[in-house]
Image (cartoon, rainbow, N blue to C red):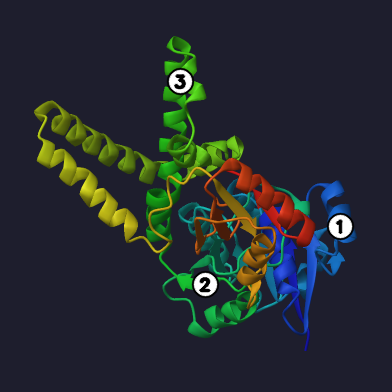
Amino acid sequence: MTRNVLVIGLGLIGGSVALALQKAPQTKIYGFDALPQTRELAKTLNVVHEIVENPAQVADKMDFIIFGTPVSATLTWMEQLKDWVLKKNVIVTDTGSTKALIMKKAEELKEMGITFIGGHPMAGSHKSGVTAAKPYLFENAYYMLTPFEDEKPETIEKLEHLLKYTIGKLVKVDATEHDHMTAVVSHFPHIVAASLVHQLQLENAQLPMTRLLAAGGFRDITRIASSNPILWRDITLQNRGELIDQLEQWTAEMNRVKSLLQDGSQDMIEQYFAVAKQVRDALPTSAGALFVPYDLYVDIPDYPGVISEVTGYLAEDNISITNIRIVETREDVFGILVISFSSADDRERAVKCIARRANFETYIS
């Protein structure tokens, strides 16, 4: 029996979900986007098997409904969903970056007998829109699910069985815990990065050369400040409670640093940086690569031999590399493979080499 899946919102995330799920056997992917031009593009690019003009009219045939829209739009869709005719055992999920608001709204659906399981694939790209969608965007990325505590295990397994074709790392967490963890490792760092850029702007007004010196470490640390401001406006507002807590902790930490500087203790200051290095180097991604100035991000699918394929191309062109690493968590990164070079010239040669030899996108941070 064919299972029907409706993806609403066919941008980068929704489009990538639709493409990934086309790998599932006996599964038909329907798609809708509020923008007519996006629907046309999705049809032309075969992002879905069939485009629909009105989700409500086909909802009664769907086994799964996936909202690939921003949280604010998803909340609106969830309200509209109440008036749709649905299959008795339909499973509804989303892809939003924050979960508390979504799951609170989902309580209203639950009271109506509609199953909703929150979702958040932690992946992204420097590009947006349906043309940036890729079937392998979620490979090796964490795909968080936030079901209600009393959700039936077999229902969760049913959704997991579908989503396994994204090749993401499926994990179940509480919605509140999700928002706290993403505030720590994703949302708050965006605020820090933006604040550093604002500080640079102020300093540059006094010393214009400051901006010219903002390379290497500064660029790496503040890279995420280049993210979509509308997206991050919404995320910040939706998770502002957690972010205020993080700001208070950050303020306390900065006061501690200020005290260290005022005391002038060499041992204490060295220890401060030593502990930071120890923790940073123990993170699950490769250690010691934060301040490499000549990094090249390569967006590759995950199949055996693909890394040796890329490095083989570089070797044939006599291009030396200084480091290579796999980025396991794809959120806010531009490619799963990161190659480091000793010079900008080598990196530029690598870009041309890969473009000539393979169909892998590259990006320089």
Q: Distance from label 3 to label 1 (Cα)?
A: 52 Å
Considering the numbered disc 1 on the image, is that residue within a helix, a strand or a loop?
A: loop
Q: Report if residue 334 is visible in the image.
A: no
Q: Position of residue 141 (x, y in %)?
A: 54, 65
Q: Nearer the viewer, mark 2 or mark 1?
A: 2
Circle 3 packing at 10 Å, graded few (<14), some (14-19), many (20+), is: some
Q: Check residue 169 in the rendering and tell me which mark sits there, or answer none.
A: 2
Residue at 79% in and 56% down:
356
Q: Are marks 3 and 1 in contact (CB under 8 Å)?
A: no
- Report the label total: 3
Q: Nearer the viewer, mark 3 or mark 2?
A: 3
Q: Are marks 2 and 1 in contact (CB under 8 Å)?
A: no
Q: Amino acid at mark 1?
A: Glu
Question: Which comes sooner in the sequence, label 3 or label 2?
Answer: 2
Q: Position of residue 25 (x, y in %)?
A: 75, 84
Q: Report if residue 103 is visible in the image.
A: yes
Q: Distance from label 3 to label 2 (Cα)?
A: 42 Å
Q: Position of residue 48 (x, y in %)?
A: 81, 66
Q: Which of 349/204 is in front?
A: 349
